[in-house]
Amino acid sequence: MVKQTAGRDQLGEFAPKFAELNDDVLFGEVWSREGELPLKTRSIVTITALISKGITDSSLKYHLMTAKMNGVSKSEMAEILTHLAFYAGWPNAWAAFNMAKEVYGDDKTSGHGGFFGMGEPNDGFAQYFTGNSYLNPVTKEDDPLQVHNVTFEPGCINHWHIHHASKGGGQVLIGVEGEGWCQIEGQDPIKILPGTIVEVPAGAKHWHGASKNSWFSHLAFMIPGEDLSNEWLEPVDEDFYNTLD
């Protein structure tokens, strides 16, 4: 997770201990326990708690924005708030819907793709993916460093592949939205969350993509080098992938 500083920024002088507990314990320790409960689920739980208590101020808006960043789509958020209306009260749901519309209102890609946008169907590489993916160029075609935002539907991953280079090369992945995985052959899978950086050396066989239940987006760029080429290989073993959580 991104290091939280809101407590110190707003209350550091007035209530330094509260600011410390907010930033270091609540967000630094509790929210960071991603192995026990994914960030997406934590966002849903937090939003439910706030709305159930009738809290529809800036704190709810912050957590709606965080939920969007953690992979909760616009359609999922609408369903969550509809469900909550019957348990937390109709007026509370109405207030939350108005705030959620602000957070998701300018989202032209139904809440997917994060800050960089979902882009278009990744048809050119579809044969190397299990499931549907989308590609949105971040840089121009003639830029020396090509950066793309790749978005995966839940359960979508690419096949094993290798980025070859005689000198330099390799790939860097930066998590943008949702939850995904990357595995280099011979190593344990790495969970990718917003802000996670994974460096894949040239010549390393690897795969990456979304978790089973979350949309996922990452930035991908190739490290400059010589004699660069890509080799696409076999699909990832489905049974192994299904063990990841």
Image: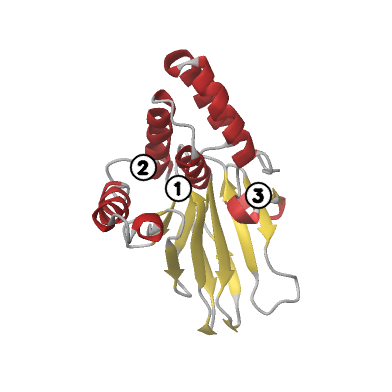
Q: CA distance from mark 3 to mark 2?
A: 22 Å
Expressed as whole percent of the image width and height from the top left, the position of residue 202 reads 48, 75
Q: CA distance from mark 2 to mark 1?
A: 8 Å
What kind of element bears circle 1? loop
Dots 2 and 1: beta carbons under 8 Å?
yes
Disc 1 residue type (three-letter): Glu
Disc 2 residue type (three-letter): Pro
Disc 3 residue type (three-letter): Met
Residue name at image x 35 percent, y 55 percent:
11
Residue under pointer 2:
38
Q: Quadrant of residue 231?
A: bottom right
Residue under pointer 3:
118
Q: 19 and 77: which one is in front?
A: 19
Residue under pointer 1:
179
Quarter of the figure with the C terminus: top left
**First of labels 3, 2 by sequence position:** 2
Expressed as whole percent of the image width and height from the top left, the position of residue 1 reads 39, 55
Q: CA distance from mark 3 to mark 1?
A: 15 Å
What kind of element bears circle 2? loop
Q: Is residue 50 above or below residue 127?
A: above
Residue name at image x 52 percent, y 44 percent:
65
Q: 240 and 75: which one is in front?
A: 75
Dots 3 and 2: beta carbons under 8 Å?
no
Relative to 34, 219 lies left or right: right
Residue name at image x 32 percent, y 47 percent:
31
Residue name at image x 53 percent, y 79 percent:
169
Q: Residues within 10 Å of mark 3 (few under 14, many from 20)?
A: many
Q: Residues within 10 Å of mark 2 (few under 14, many from 20)?
A: some
